[in-house]
Amino acid sequence: MGGLNYQVNLISALLEFENQRVEPILFLGDDVAIDVLERFNALDGLKIVHSKVFNRSHKNRRLLKAIVTGCDTDALAVFKVHEIDVVFEAADFYGWHFNIPTIAWIPDLQHRKLRQYFGFFAFWKREIGFRMQVYAKRHIMLSSLDAAKDFQQFYKLPNERLHVVNFSVPVRPIKFDFEVLLAKYNLPRHFFYLPNQFWQHKNHECVIKALGIAKREGKEIIVAVSGNHEDSRDPDYFPKLLSLIAAESVEDNFRVLGMIPYDDVQALMLSAAALINPSRFEGWSTTVEEAKSLGVEMLLSDINVHREQAEQNALFFEQDKPAQLAEQMITLSSISIDKRIEDMKQAAERSRTFMSLFAMKFTTVVEAAAKSL
């Protein structure tokens, strides 16, 4: 879902802000899920090319051919027909001798920095994929200076082939009834919001323990938590969190909402006392980017990329010190929902500024790649 959202937002930004410099063309298989296709069809002005070459059933064969022979000739032929100047290689690999300039987007170096969360095959699948893109002389695009620093530490890429493009997310004014929203999710008027997937590195444990500390001090704090429960690297992770919730006696404080509509995500963010992101690692946080555009207060783990992204517009706590987070939640005063809703116009304008920068920086990378072959 994260990769899908990234591409939808990128294409949307290009179409709105850089359509005179870059024409995005999307290549899809004939077997794309209807809900995914609807996301792209909603982008006015996007040219979509459907070809069975890009069907899922052909992906492994194409990848093997790209590795063994050095070129995915099937994909290359389709791109040549449509006169493609630069290819954006996301979660794919077209070969060592692929003769169209190519940009590879790498979200983060989590497998290197948090090795303990990856099994042998999961680690080497990512590692081999990244190394192939480096050795194939791709232009590598990362989302933060922190990620670029990590990349240079592990792979030593020439500076002219390494690019940092901070992604952004669109914010549009929404209308919602605050009281109806609270009733829908059974929330009090004062709560915090944590919209992260239930993956190990997202560090939900810190929040659960912070709630336990606050409760033992006589403070009842509520955190609403949305996101996918599944972590393919550790299917037992969510059950372990449920056990920790029970051990801390915070079943009523840590409210698990599951997957919810995106409009409700934005509405909850606007309604919460603050956004919480306790993550141990990020390439560039989507939730922080949303809160930043919306002008929502943030309580963030003190990791380099959070400092880079939020700058001074947040309170920071050490990721393994839930007592710090508990203290911040206890002291954070109530916010004015009405004022936030009134400021939605300014939030949308901030978002447009961030999106235009996203499109401009990406287009600059495209132009650099086009000149490099």
Image (cartoon, rainbow, N blue to C red):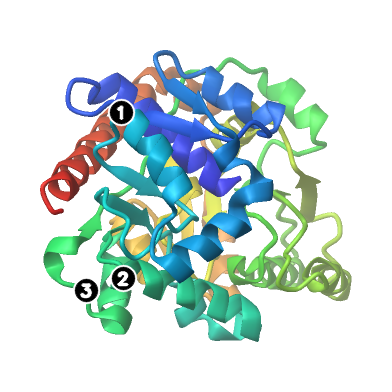
| Foreground tag (1 vs 2) | 2
Q: Which residue is mark 3?
A: 157
At x 31% / y 70%, what residue is drawn?
134
Q: Which residue is mark 1?
A: 14
- Image quadrant holding the N terminus, namely top right
The part of the image, by quadrant, that contains residue 270 is top right
| Foreground tag (3 vs 2) | 2
Q: Earlier in the sequence, mark 3 or mark 2?
A: 2
- Give percent across and percent down for residue 73: 42, 50
Name the one closer to the observer, 77 or 13.
77
Q: Which amino acid lies under the numbered mark 2 shown in the image of this protein?
A: Val
Q: Callout 1: 10 Å neighbours few (<14), some, many (20+)?
A: many
Q: Earlier in the sequence, mark 3 or mark 1?
A: 1
At x 75% / y 70%, what residue is drawn?
212
- Give percent across and percent down for residue 41: 54, 19
- Give percent across and percent down for residue 276: 55, 55
Mark 3 to mark 2: distance in Å? 7 Å
The part of the image, by quadrant, that contains residue 291 is top left
| Foreground tag (3 vs 1) | 3
Mark 1 to mark 2: distance in Å? 26 Å
Checking the image for residue 134, the label placed there is 2
Q: Which amino acid lies under the numbered mark 1 shown in the image of this protein?
A: Leu
Would you say 132 lies left or right of 92 here? left
Q: Which amino acid lies under the numbered mark 3 shown in the image of this protein?
A: Leu
Circle 2 — which element?
helix
Circle 1 — which element?
helix
Mark 3 to mark 1: distance in Å? 27 Å
At x 47% / y 77%, what residue is drawn?
127
Name the one closer to the observer, 260 or 147.
147
At x 85% / y 67%, what residue is drawn?
242
Name the one closer to the observer, 244 or 159.
159
